[in-house]
Amino acid sequence: MRNGVNRGSSLTDSGLTRRRLLGWLGALVPARILAAFPESPGSASRDQTAAVLAGFPRTSIFQTRYRADATILFCGLPLFSRSNVGSGFASVEISETAKGRAIALQFAAGSDPVRAHGLRRWGVLRESFAERAGSSEAAFSGVLTASQEESFDQAQKALNRTAAETPGVLTHGNIRGKAMLAWVDHVTLPEEGDWEKHAQSLPDLLRRHSCGLPRELEVEDQATFLHTMREARLRPGDRNRLAFVHGGKSYWLEIRRHGPSELLGVIRDADGRRSAEFRTAYAAGDLIGIPQRIEYQAKSYLRLVFEAEPHATQSIPTLFPEDAI
């Protein structure tokens, strides 16, 4: 007996193989949800965003890189600002053929520890949607470093912190018809290294981490977060209220137009509580839905602004399979 574990037996010895255990967990998910997913619950550990796009040739791509600036707030008032504390990128990839259509969206951003007083924060979100022969499917995956700082004082203490690892949240899932399965796992992420390389390793991260019990949800449509943000830009009207799902939960996006090229937005959870607020600006006549400027209130003490860098030349990873490019 060591650390409360009986070393004289194993899960396999007792008949609790991984496959059987996952089967028991799957039995807890309503049959009406699992009926849309013939795979076992554990098989969704691979990156489904690329799998949804299989068989679709990419016909167009649009992408933008950003510079991130930060303003520290104290009691709601700007205390000081610093430019170029990080970077980010966004992309829209489209496939339109006689057999169907597909779209892939991604947004990723991370801090530069040298410019951000040692803070290492990064995240990436990927989404795909495909429609063929009267059926449709959506998938999403993402990872985000977990920020424990909820106040200005806590943020100060986190500056110049040194650690080999940092906690993060990994999420991924599928939506077929009106059925969604989503997995949300707490993971340990490397502290050192370039955030873009970490973001590009998301498929490997998904393969390495086993799935627990999925969250299940019946949804009205297949609206995920980035797709809903893009829809808010392209949909006519001065005000819109759009439902979407993220990480196995339901949210509302409330949008108000501010002039011809700006949106003011509030995100609320299913109970109506405000989760985030932002302002986005677009190029004149934009029909793609990639903002040129994003102003986001990340915390009560932190405002982030992402400004497009039109002359940036670094490549942005594609979500389409390589043979579709």
Image: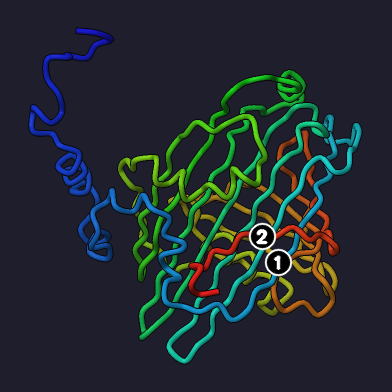
Quarter assignment of residue 104 = bottom right
CB contact under 8 Å: marks 1 and 2? yes
The disc, 1 or 2, on the residue closer to the chain's N-terminal end is 1
**Measured from the top left, where is residue 32 in percent x and y?**
23, 62
Which residue is identified by label 2?
Answer: 316
Quarter assignment of residue 176 = bottom left
In the rendered structure, which amino acid carries the disc numbered 2?
A: Ile
- In space, the residues marked 1 and 2 are separated at their CA atoms by 8 Å
Q: Is residue 216 left or right of residue 316?
A: left
Which residue is identified by label 1?
Answer: 63
Circle nearer the viewer, 1 or 2: 2
Residue for point 45% across, 74% down = 130
Residue nearest the viewer, comparing 45 with 198: 198
Residue for point 45% across, 68% down = 222
Residue for point 80% across, 32% down = 116
**Measured from the top left, where is residue 210 in percent x and y?**
34, 40
What secondary structure is found at the residue carrying circle 2? loop
Quarter assignment of residue 238 = bottom right
**Measured from the top left, where is residue 213 in percent x and y?**
30, 43
Residue for point 17% across, 46% down = 23
In the rendered structure, which amino acid carries the disc numbered 1?
A: Gln
Residue nearest the viewer, comparing 170 with 309: 309
**Measured from the top left, where is residue 78 in percent x and y?**
89, 36
| Total marks in image | 2
Residue nearest the viewer, comparing 266 with 166: 166
Q: Is residue 74 left or right of residue 64?
A: right
